[in-house]
Image: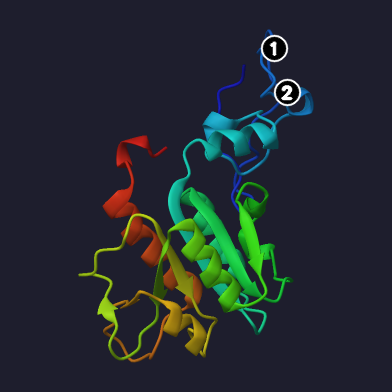
Amino acid sequence: MDEIKPGPTEWGETPGVGPWEGPLPEGSRYDPELLRDGDTRNVVDAYRYWTRDAIIADIDTRRHPLHIAIENFGSDANIGTVVRTANAFAVHTVHIVGKRRWNRRGAMVTDRYQRLAHHDTIEDLLEFAAQAGLTVVAVDNVPGSVPLETAVLPRDCLLVFGQEGPGITPQASAGAGLTVSIAQFGSTRSINAGVAAGIAMHAWIRTHADISAAW
């Protein structure tokens, strides 16, 4: 078999791996077409030549009890970025509240491997969280919020992010058991919602994830 090289990025820097050389591996997780033609997907080396279903099934065995929700009442362009980051951290589910349609370009096809759920209203999301035993944590720079840098995020929690500009809706804020903010030191009033989501997710990872299990 050819030496496995890093997979392609969104900038198209590398071609992935070519067709499999030598005796074909056994197991249903391998995709016959990928073995024959090569695998140019942006996946980690451990998943080279695997079928999409096999990759999803493997990630499902390692997903974290962290849920993410982002409000989409104005067609937020950050959703793709949130989904992509959630996939990188093996987040359990990304919940999209409001409009069903969102720009998937920023997800860089990671939405194929990430669990997604839709809720028409914040009330629907809060009901889900209550039934699932998740603590709702709003992430927003508002008066009375707790600095994320000193807060202790619950293990079983749902991080909620508002859309760019208006931030968390009053309904989401009222339903949260905890509101955290990200420390800022410059001139802008807020940071990009996709970036904020990545910072908050990583804060949870540093506290609760088994870092030795990372790729």
Q: In this figure, which residue is indicated by the disc labeled 1? A: 24
Tell whether 61 sits left or right of 26: left
Tell whether 176 sits left or right of 116: left
| Other residues around mark 1 within 10 Å, as few (<14) / some (14–19) / many (≥20) | few
Q: Residue 103 at x, y = what percent?
A: 70, 69
Of labels 1 and 2, earlier in sequence is 1
What element does badge 1 sit on? loop
Residue 64 lies, with reference to residue 132, above or below; the image says: above
Tell me the quadrant of the picture where the N terminus can be found: top right
Question: Going by the picture, which residue comes out furthest to the front?
Answer: 131
- CB atoms of marks 1 and 2 within 8 Å: yes
Q: Residue 4 at x, y = what percent?
A: 56, 27
In this view of the protein, can residue 169 be seen by the observer?
no
The amino acid on which the numbered mark 2 sits, given as a three-letter code, is: Leu
Q: In this figure, which residue is indicated by the disc labeled 2? A: 35
Tell whether 169 sits left or right of 15: left
Determine the residue positioned at 29% across, 53% down. Answer: 206
Residue 12 lies, with reference to residue 49, above or below; the image says: below
In this view of the protein, can residue 36 be seen by the observer?
yes
